[in-house]
Image: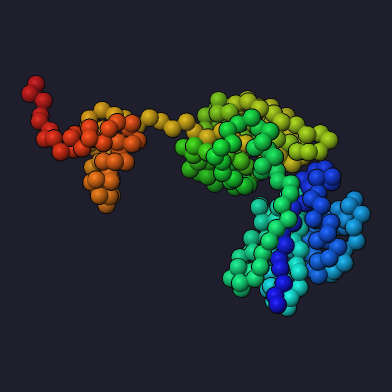
Amino acid sequence: MTGTLVLAATPIGQVGDAPPRLVHELATADVVAAEDTRRLKRLCGDLGVEIGGRVVSYFEGNEQARTPMLVEALQNGERVLLVTDAGMPSVSDPGYRLVAACVEADLLVTAVPGPSAVLTALAVSGLPVDRFCFEGFLPRKAGERSRRLGGLATEERTMVFFEAPHRTAAALAAMADAFGDDRAAAVCRELTKTHEEVRRGGLRELAEWAADGVRGEVTVVVTGAVPEAAPSDPDSLRAAVAGREAAGERRKDAIAAVAKAAGVPKREVYDLVHRPVHPDPS
């Protein structure tokens, strides 16, 4: 029988937030793959657990080389536990490559759910959480960062970003340029830790606050764009249907989509499309 890969969430701040199953998995796994073995040792000391299996490092610099070794261990029936420094493995942390390899090899993958900076920041942000997307870390170079944010300017879902403390001010300023100075946001710093802070306000205001320096782990939550109402005048409706048809959409489907976006009856759009357009006599 093949083994099981277990992705285990670790505390993002308070060690008391560690899920009870984490202790059991640490004690019983055949292999514990850790992003930082020194942090793993400290975590085990805080939890009062002794690792029963062998420990290997698994971080960004060696995951490509280590993945085949871990897959082989799983194929040999061993239980492999993967932990990262904080939060859930593979979410802006090592793990995706190993999970993909296990799926390809038809190996069982499960998880020990637990702390998440993404969900914690969303919950305390005070911003809409019914629909959201996780954007991870922005590019470090200013030009690439601006292009990424420009592509998100019309994103209607609440967005969650991770950011390094020394780049937070620049990232917030770039967001203000891309999304608008007054777009509502929250900077969540040191979540669940002693010096936890949630700063809420417009993006430009937050960028000015961050210019004095930000310390600790940072998660930024930004509200989504407000959708603009589609034009509903006759010429705009005809043009919208024509554009969809030119892109290969059936006229019936194009009429339905344009009517829905504009908030008008389909029959009204149908009549406009099929009614001859007479030139203005003036």
- Residue at coordinates 56% horizontally, 37% vertically from top-left? 130
Residue 64 shows up from this direction: no
Name the quadrant containing residue 35. bottom right
Pick out the residue farthest to the left: 281
The answer to whether residue 111 is above or below residue 115 is below
> Is residue 137 rendered to the left or right of residue 245?
right
Residue 13 position within the rendered picture, expressed as x and y whole percent measured from the top left: 80, 43
Name the quadrant containing residue 202. top right
Pick out the residue farthest to the top: 282
> Is residue 253 rendered to the left or right of residue 278?
right
Residue 242 shows up from this direction: yes
Which quarter of the figure is the N terminus placed in? Answer: bottom right
Viewer-side residue, 141 vs 48: 48
Q: Which color scheme is applied?
A: rainbow
Residue 260 position within the rendered picture, expressed as x and y whole percent measured from the top left: 33, 36
Which quarter of the figure is the C terminus placed in? Answer: top left
- Residue at coordinates 73% horizontally, 78% vertically from top-left? 76
- Residue at coordinates 70% horizontally, 58% vertically from top-left? 111
Residue 136 position within the rendered picture, expressed as x and y whole percent measured from the top left: 62, 47
- Residue at coordinates 51% horizontally, 44% vertically from top-left? 147
The answer to whether residue 195 is above or below residue 148 is above
Viewer-side residue, 96 vs 260: 260
Viewer-side residue, 250 vs 21: 21
> Is residue 129 rendered to the left or right of residue 68?
left
